[in-house]
């Protein structure tokens, strides 16, 4: 007799929230600034053209380095004083081999916290105190955190000398870092001075603009204001699926068949879904969208804040009110990042999602989507 074991499906998480950029206690700055390790951003602007928005986004620039470094580089007093403590915040991410579940990953947060997420073998050789990782087989992975801003991080102090010895003798291999230095006051990316023997590759921001026409664009009035919570959530989820298809420039986004396909499996919702489809989607005759892709191998939180500012500027200053329907921007975090939001531990398993999407309107209302994989401590 055949035996087919049943295993529970991994449960991803999607958090939805509704607020305004002008609220007394706005969440958007915290959401962006506490999610430091990102690699790609996408802006979606319906009913506009490349010519209309090129000047809006000309101010977004930046670069990062791809560089092989030993961990002892970060213990240099020049690095600590010039980049970590001075407000010129160095941020970097590196991994060896396969990723966060199987190999060693190192990350430097903008606040000066150096994170080592390492295998059991590396941890036992390292000789520094840490704690067992929250995810994965029991005590097969460990996390070591070092505060580079601490007053004790100077030569001659016991803790500093111990860390330096370990980085030079037990964990002395080089990691390939994606790293940037961002002035915390201005958000401007700045040069990093590396030792003479280091050969960094400086990689500028790559921006690609793509225009597509003939797409049915939802006006999204149903999710801009919350009436019935369950209905609002469902419409927000329907739109999120549509936005994913539009991002891929899939043919399905032209026909918008996702709600229809779902209705075939949920007869109770078919009538409501068809009503939503016909009521909220305008004619495709003049509907068009432009998507701006901004590629960073290590996009910083500061860059994301600048991006948010430009989206708000577009929405509020667009002279033609028929154009300013809504806008969205999505930022993808590294799947192998050791943390996601607010320093919370992050793993991978079958997928390591940790990304977010803002949908914004000219009056500064926004809906926020935060998507996470199963192995993530943020909630």
Image (cartoon, rainbow, N blue to C red):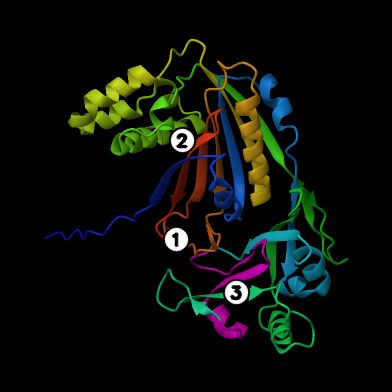
Residue most extreme to the left: 1
Residue that badge 2 annotates: 244
In this view, the residue in front, 374 or 344, is 344
Q: Whole-percent x and y of residue 125?
A: 59, 84
Q: Which residues are magenta?
A: 100-129
| Residue ID at (52%, 23%) | 325
Q: Which mark is residue 376?
A: 1
The answer to whether 152 is drawn above or below residue 210 in the figure is below
The answer to whether 176 is drawn above or below residue 77 in the figure is above
The N terminus: image quadrant: bottom left
| Residue ID at (34%, 38%) | 233
Say what secondary structure mark 3 lies in. Answer: strand
Say what secondary structure mark 2 lies in. Answer: helix
Q: Whole-percent x and y of residue 340?
A: 52, 58
- Earlier sequence position, callout 1 versus callout 2: 2
The answer to whether 260 is drawn above or below residue 332 in the figure is above
Q: CA distance from mark 3 to mark 2?
A: 36 Å
- Relative to 361, 350 lies left or right: left
Question: Which is in the foreground here, disc 3 or disc 2?
Answer: 3
Q: Whole-percent x and y of residue 292?
A: 62, 32
- Residue 121 located within the stretch drawn in magenta: yes
Q: Which mark is residue 145?
A: 3
Mark 1–mark 2 CB contact (< 8 Å) = no
Q: Whole-percent x and y of residue 366?
A: 50, 36
Q: CA distance from mark 1 to mark 3?
A: 18 Å
- Earlier sequence position, callout 1 versus callout 3: 3
Q: Quadrant of residue 4?
A: bottom left
The C terminus: image quadrant: bottom left
Residue most extreme to the right: 196
Question: Which is in the foreground here, disc 1 or disc 2?
Answer: 1
| Residue ID at (58%, 49%) | 32
């Amino acid at each position: 007799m055949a035996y087919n074991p049943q295993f529970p499906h991994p449960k991803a998480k999607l958090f939805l929230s509704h607020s305004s950029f002008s609220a007394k206690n706005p969440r958007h700055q915290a959401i962006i600034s506490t999610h430091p390790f990102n690699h790609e951003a996408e802006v979606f602007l319906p009913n506009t053209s490349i010519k209309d928005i090129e000047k809006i986004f000309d101010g977004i620039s930046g670069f990062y380095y791809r560089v092989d470094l030993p961990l002892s580089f970060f213990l240099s007093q020049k690095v600590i004083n010039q980049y970590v403590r001075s407000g010129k915040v160095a941020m970097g991410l590196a991994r060896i081999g396969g990723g966060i579940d199987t190999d060693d990953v190192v990350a430097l947060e903008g606040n000066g916290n150096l994170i080592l997420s390492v295998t059991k073998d590396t941890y036992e050789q390292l000789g520094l105190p840490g704690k067992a990782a929250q995810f994965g087989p029991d005590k097969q992975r460990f996390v070591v955190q070092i505060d580079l801003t601490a007053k004790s991080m100077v030569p001659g102090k016991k803790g500093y000398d111990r860390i330096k010895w370990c980085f030079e003798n037990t964990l002395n291999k080089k990691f390939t870092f994606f790293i940037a230095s961002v002035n915390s006051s201005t958000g401007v990316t700045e040069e990093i001075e590396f030792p003479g023997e280091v050969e960094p590759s400086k990689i500028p921001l790559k921006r690609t603009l793509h225009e597509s026409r003939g797409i049915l664009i939802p006006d999204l009035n149903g999710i801009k204001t919350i009436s019935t919570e369950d209905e609002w959530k469902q419409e927000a989820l329907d739109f999120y699926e549509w936005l994913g298809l539009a991002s891929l420039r899939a043919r399905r986004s032209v026909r918008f068949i996702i709600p229809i396909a779902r209705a075939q499996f949920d007869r109770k919702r078919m009538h409501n879904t068809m009503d939503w489809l016909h009521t909220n989607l305008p004619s495709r005759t003049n509907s068009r969208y432009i998507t701006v892709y901004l590629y960073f191998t290590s996009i910083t939180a500061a860059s994301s804040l600048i991006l948010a500012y430009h989206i708000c500027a577009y929405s509020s200053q667009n002279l033609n009110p028929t154009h300013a329907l809504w806008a969205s921007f999505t930022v993808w975090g590294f799947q192998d990042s050791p943390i996601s939001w607010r320093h919370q531990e992050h793993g991978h398993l079958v997928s390591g999602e940790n990304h977010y999407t803002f949908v914004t309107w000219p009056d500064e209302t926004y809906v926020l989507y935060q998507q996470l994989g199963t192995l993530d401590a943020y909630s």
